[in-house]
Image (cartoon, grey):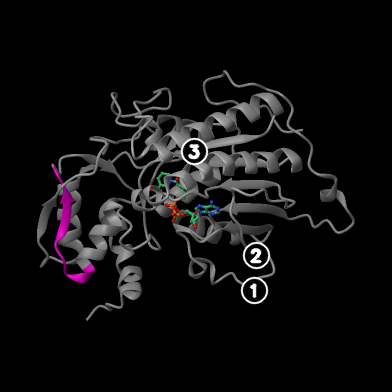
Amino acid sequence: MAKQVTNGDNNSAAKAPPPPSPLRFSKFFQPNMRILVTGGAGFIGSHLVDRLMENEKNEVIVADNYFTGSKDNSKKWIGHPRFELIRHDVTEPLLVEVDQIYHLACPASPIFYKYNPVKTIKTNVIGTLNMLGLAKRVGARILLTSTSEVYGDPLVHPQDESYWGNVNPIGVRSCYDEGKRVAETLMFDYHRQHGIEIRVARIFNTYGPRMNIDDGRVVSNFIAQAVRGEPLTVQAPGTQTRSFCYVSDMVDGLIRLMEGENTGPINLGNPGEFTMIELAETVKELINPNVEISKVENTPDDPRQRKPDITKAKKLLGWEPKIKLRDGLPLMEEDFRSRLGKPTN
Ligand SMILES: NC(=O)c1ccc[n+]([C@@H]2O[C@H](COP(=O)([O-])OP(=O)(O)OC[C@H]3O[C@@H](n4cnc5c(N)ncnc54)[C@H](O)[C@@H]3O)[C@@H](O)[C@H]2O)c1
């Protein structure tokens, strides 16, 4: 029986979780931890898979429809006896015998999630329902990667987990932020009603190698522009702020949350706050001092400020980011240069 879990505020339900599937006790059972990573061919998912595969007791199954992810991100594990890659869309049910589910499947960049908003909200709602159904059936613990977007355009700053958010329910971003809010609701309803062991991470902007090039996310945009020698395009007014967490720190936080005894929601992000102009200037200085910085029009509903309060993650997970922005940005350069065919001279 699993230990009692809390959400860090001592108001979580304590219903017993369902038992593992009987298949786990068949004579073919291997004493490994079987872990499903949905969206494991994407940016954060593939780094998470790399870290999970380092542990020889883990068997990792990736389920991904390759909408924004790529087989390339998993290629070093293809053929490995502890690794499996399944082309699968989470809006369809999936039956696999697993002990843990990291549920990441969902396009994260505005360009991709706005490309097919109906599909995005289906992925968030039906996809999360399917994964919770799987968790219930096999008695697995499930972690959802929610987002700082659930805070919308926040009226409190910085945002801690008790803030309920200021979200436009009918805007062009709503398929993503309202979708994630429903996904969180489903997680907590399955936890209260069925005793499912849940973990909810609210991820703030994360960056690192393998981000999609030209995906509209500000760090990947600036790095790609700097590598190509194009102007860095800052959306007006440029004073809006974001915080940026390096992907290895994020993966560490996700694994601590999964292995810990708190349901969350827990903010994971780097509290260092930068304006878009500051970010552009830093990329210019570190990657290509010859490029210009230019202003372009902003998109609707772009939040003015975003900065995580990570007090809860520090206290409950013993976690805080270690990599500073100035150290993390250069770690992306080589990956972007090789994918853009622009090697260092
Ligand atoms: N990167 C960030 O800054 C950030 C911030 C907040 C939250 N998140 C969350 O973290 C998770 C991973 O984000 P990422 O940055 O790695 O994005 P990503 O787009 O690189 O990865 C998402 C993966 O999910 C897959 N996917 C999308 N829809 C699917 C579906 N219907 N069925 C199966 N697979 C599907 C994609 O092909 C891709 O491999 C997402 O849930 C995202 O909402 C990310």
**Amino acid at dot 2:** Phe
- Residue at 52% in and 20% down: 9
Label 2 residue near ligand 1, CB within 8 Å: no
Which badge, 1 or 3, comes first in the chain's sequence?
Answer: 1
Which badge, 2 or 3, comes first in the chain's sequence?
Answer: 2
* Label annotation for residue 79: 1
Q: Give the CA separation, mark 1 to mark 3.
A: 31 Å
Image height check: is 238 above or below 219? above
**Amino acid at dot 3:** Ala
Q: Give the CA separation, mark 2 to mark 3.
A: 25 Å
- Labels 2 and 1 touching (C-beta < 8 A): yes
Say whether residue 5 is visible. Answer: no
Label 1 residue near ligand 1, CB within 8 Å: no
Mark 3 closeness class: few <14, some 14–19, many ≥20 residues within 10 Å: many
* Label annotation for residue 83: 2
Mark 1 closeness class: few <14, some 14–19, many ≥20 residues within 10 Å: few
Label 1 element class: loop
Which segment did they paint magenta?
227-236
Image location of residue 64, percent across then percent down:
56, 58
Image location of residue 98, percent across then percent down:
71, 50
Q: In this view, does 304 lie to the left or right of 173?
A: left
